[in-house]
Image: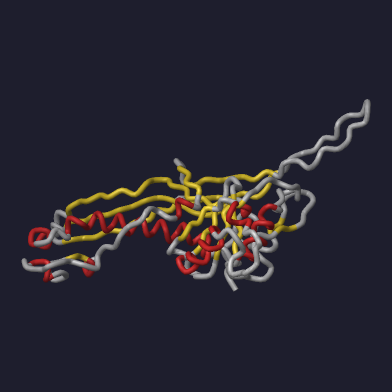
Amino acid sequence: MTGLVHTTGSFPELLYPGLAAIWGESYSQYPKMYERFMTIKTSNKRFEKEQGLTGFSLASVKNEGDSVEYARATQGYQKEYQMLTYGLGASVTREMVEDDQYGYIRRIPELLAQAMVRTEEVQATGVLNSGFDASVTGADGQALFSTAHPNAGSGGGTQSNRPAVAADLTQTSLEAAIIAVRDFRDENNQRVMIQPKKLVVSNSDFFNATKILQTEYKVGSADNDVNVISGLGLELVVTTYLTDPDAWFLVTDAANGLTFYRRRAATIERDNDISTQNLNIVTTERFDVGFTDWRTAYGSPGA
C-alpha cells in the first residue's frame, strides 16, 4: 500500500497558500437513481433466498354429488442473493494532514462516500446493463431479457420479455412493449394482472422519451391520432449509468423483481497506524443486487 499513501509529495500545491480554487475532486451529486426502479430490501443474513411457487390452474366444473378436483402447487425457481462487502480507503501521512492548507484532507470521508454511492449505482444499474447477456442468468437459467423464459408449471412453455427484433424507443415500439407486458402469464401460463409503471432510459433518450410520454397526439405525425401512452401515467426514469445509449426498459409492478438487498449500510471509519502515524480512512458496505421474477421488466437493447 506504500505507493497509495497520500504524502506531501502527492499534493505539493496544497502545502502553499494562494490557490484560488481546487477543482476536479468532486462533482454535483444527485439523488440515487437506482432507487427509482429497484426495490430496496434489508437483510440480516449472509445470504437471502427467494422461492417461487407455481400457484394453481383454473377451476373445473363440479357435478352434483361429485368431489371437487384437487390440484397441487409446486415449487418454482429459486433466487439467491449473496451479501458482498464493498470497500474503499485512503491513507494520508501525518505530515500531509498537518501541512494541508486547504482542508482537502478533511474532505476525504465525503469523497469516499461519493465513491460508494457511485458503486451502488454501477452495480444496481448493471442488472439492466447485463440483462441481454446470455452468460448472466437468473433463477430460470435465462438472461433477464429473453424470448425463452421457461414456465415452471406442469404445462411447460416459454414466455418473452423482449422484442423478437431489437428496436429503438419509438411510440410504436413502446406500444408493442406495453401490450406484451399486459400479456405476461404466470408459471402455469395463466393470465395475471401485471402493468408497466416506469420507463427507464439513458440520458441520450431523455428528449425522445419525454416527447412520447407527454405529447397528446401521435409523435412526429400530421395525423390527428391520439397518443394513448400520454395518458397511462408512466413515470420516466433517466439514469446516466446505462452503458447502451439506445437501450430502454419498462419496469412493471410485478413483486420480487429488480432488487437491491442491503445487509449493512455504508459507514466511514478512521484510525491511525502507530508505526507510520498514517491516517487511514475506510468506507465499507454490504449488499447484493439482482432480479428474482423476470416479469419485473421488459427491455430492448435498441436497434
Residue at position x 51%, y 61% from top?
Answer: 210
Q: Quadrant of the C terminus?
A: bottom right
Residue at position x 22%, y 70% from top?
Answer: 3
The outermost residue toward the top is 65
Q: How many marks do you count on the picture?
A: 0
Q: Which quarter of the picture shows residue 66?
A: top right
* Residue 15 visible from this viewpoint: yes
Residue at position x 53%, y 64% from top?
Answer: 130
Q: Is 82 or 158 nearer to us in this picture?
A: 158
Residue at position x 68%, y 52% from top?
Answer: 182
**Left or right: residue 180 compared with residue 236:** right
The answer to whether 43 is drawn above or below residue 212 in the figure is above
Q: Is 45 or 104 nearer to us in this picture?
A: 104
The outermost residue toward the bottom is 303
**Left or right: residue 189 compared with residue 293:** right
In x, y percent, where is residue 216?
58, 58
**Left or right: residue 276 compared with residue 286:** left
**Left or right: residue 153 compared with residue 36:** right
